[in-house]
Image: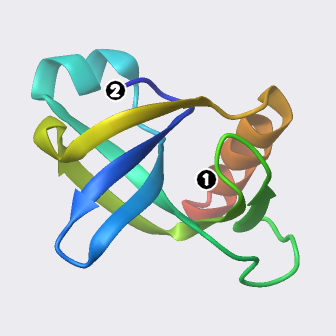
Amino acid sequence: MKRGHVYELSFAGGPAHVLVISSDALNEQNKTATCVLVYPQRVREATLVDIPVGAPSSGTIVLGEFRTLSSARFTQDLGPVDERVMEAVEIGLRAVFDL
């Protein structure tokens, strides 16, 4: 599980896409990753905490909803988001946590 990559997950309600936001070192050490959901549609207009993404999964990254998930749930690495998207995520995370 790599930071900045979108993964497909296995959930009881069906597959979902998430963006990994935790560090690669922690992901490896704990066999878990902290993620944010990629909603399959545009939820709202772009803000600091709602970031549109087009690839590798199309939709909206919502930074206010975090989940720490075990590696067993990750079924497919869809690839990394664009550097600009990850920069927006980092800015949004600082805003969410008032850092």
Residue 37 spot, x, y in % from top left: 48, 63
Q: Which label lies toward us, 2 or 1?
A: 2
Out of 94 and 75, give the one closest to the viewer: 75
Task: List x then y, in percent, for residue 25.
Answer: 30, 15
Real-space CA distance between mark 2 and mark 1, rounded to the nearest whole angstrom = 19 Å
Q: Position of residue 94 (x, y in %)?
A: 64, 51
| Label 1 sits on residue | 93
Residue at image position (47%, 58%) is 36
Q: Where is residue 78 in the image (x, y as percent from the top left)?
A: 52, 34
Q: Is residue 13 left or right of residue 12?
A: right
Who's the residue at 71% across and 37% down the image? 86
The answer to which of 96 and 64 lies nearer the viewer is 64
Residue 36: mark in rendering:
none
* In-image side of 7 versus 28 (left or right): right
Q: Is there CB contact under 8 Å for labels 2 and 1?
A: no
Q: What residue type is labelled 1?
A: Leu
Amino acid tagged 2:
Met
Q: Residue at label 2?
A: 1
* Residue at x-position 40% and y-position 48%: 8
Tally the numbered discs: 2
At 68% from the left and 42% from the top, the residue drawn is 90
